Amino acid sequence: MLLRKRDGGLLNEKDWLELFSGFESGEVPDYQLAALLMAIYFRGLNLEETIDLTRAMVKSGDVLDLTAVPGFKVDKHSTGGVGDKTTLVLAPLLAAYGLPVVKLAGRALGHTGGTLDKLQSIPGVRVDLSEEEIVEQAKAIGLVVAGQSERLVPADRKLYALRDVTGTVESLPLIAASVMSKKVAGGADGIVIDVKMGSGGFCPTLETAEKLAEFMVAIGKELDRKLVVRISRMEQPLGQAVGNTLEMAEAIRTLQNEGPDDLKQLVLTLAGDLCLMAEPEKPREQVTAELEELLRNGSALQKLEELVAYQGGDPEMVRNPEKLPRAKVKLAVTLMEDGWLQHLDAAAVGRVAMRLGAGRKVKEDVIDPTVGVILWRKAGDEIHRGEPVATIHAASLEQAMQAKQELEQLFRLGPRPIGQEKTPLVDERIWRSF
């Protein structure tokens, strides 16, 4: 199998099933699988091969049975980005709308954030739920955000661990198979996928993002899943907060209808896509108005309170986010010149937050949920000398000073605005499997 792919041959579902079985039994050593991943990285997988890999990954474990949960069940996935706390707003909002949400989320790795880490910045919240607990909670409150159980797509966990250490994470077929196998195993009726394009995501160019969208929609069609894929931009962080507790607080503010415009826009777009899957006869304008009302009247925020309480956390921290744990040191970042912010690199900001302790270089790293960065200015904004452009939250003054030096270099100013013709946050195109 390794030699066949090395030489440009094709792999099929039977090959993958035999490989996963051999890896599980110990007959196939991890270095052979690592070598195969590298061969795939350079040789690629065609669409048929990617579909076969996805099928085999799903068959490696259980498929979550949500038939006992009434209604049109929905799920969402993002390919990962800096400041991306979308799920923490989107999931409660959809549950308040009446669509049950079962979201199996992940943790931070590298400069991209993890939903589970952000949710667990509320002390006491459990995310290691059994499949039985997931179903019961979905029936009770229509909302679950939990980790992937050991029995769901175990092949994906093994492959991802090796992809991370072999530098093959960015392979588009491997990304597509990883995402789609988990979405199929998650049991939802409708799925929306947010492909992040830009320095802060795994698709640096629009071309690669489009190819990934096409891959996933084709897999969705073949595996009979209702799927919508959107592309959103990740050249700069989403929202203002980067860091687990800081992002949790920003998600809560957004559910209070006070969050940053870009985050709210993305949430309403993705939520609207899922609502229209369930109710295709409705005009999008009506759906958007109903979702906005759920933010205004507090219904979506109440759903987050229910989720936190059901999973062992203190809902008072949702009602009063100022009670969330805070970092020991806060340090303002100011610039000594006037101008217009031309660019703010998402990946670079993410790496600053990671070095503060907000992310992981390897999966074994322990994060500090309280640290991170608040950005008061984004690309296109005017900046005046001496005014704060960011605030660093750190565990020590030494770490804060180092982060300040790094952030100051990232704010690139120019003598005039970058223009009003900026590309929209969310691409207007929609890729569908139905």
Image: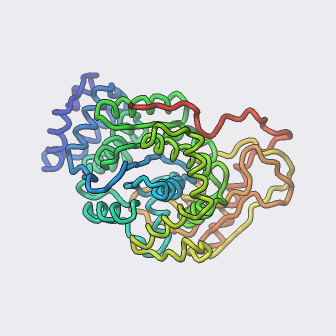
Q: Looking at this rendering, what residue extends furthest in the front direction?
A: 281
Identified at 63% across, 60% down, the residue is 296
Q: Is residue 229 above or below residue 293?
A: above
Whether residue 372 appears in this view of the structure is no
Q: Is residue 372 above or below residue 324?
A: above
Identified at 54% across, 36% down, the residue is 204
Specify whether 294 is left or right of 67: right
Specify whether 199 is left or right of 54: right
- Image x and y of residue 128, in percent: 33, 65
Specify whether 341 is left or right of 344: right
Q: Nearer the viewer, residue 99 or 246?
A: 99
- Image x and y of residue 427, in percent: 58, 34
Identified at 55% across, 67% down, the residue is 245
Count of marks, rendered view? 0
- Image x and y of residue 384, in percent: 86, 54
Specify whether 232 is left or right of 38: right
Q: Looking at this rendering, what residue extends furthest in the top direction?
A: 8
Which quarter of the figure is the N terminus placed in? Answer: top left
Whether residue 313 appears in this view of the structure is yes
Which quarter of the figure is the C terminus placed in? Answer: top left
Quarter residue 424 falls in? top right
Q: Is residue 321 above or below residue 217?
A: below
Quarter residue 144 falls in? bottom left
- Image x and y of residue 174, in percent: 35, 37
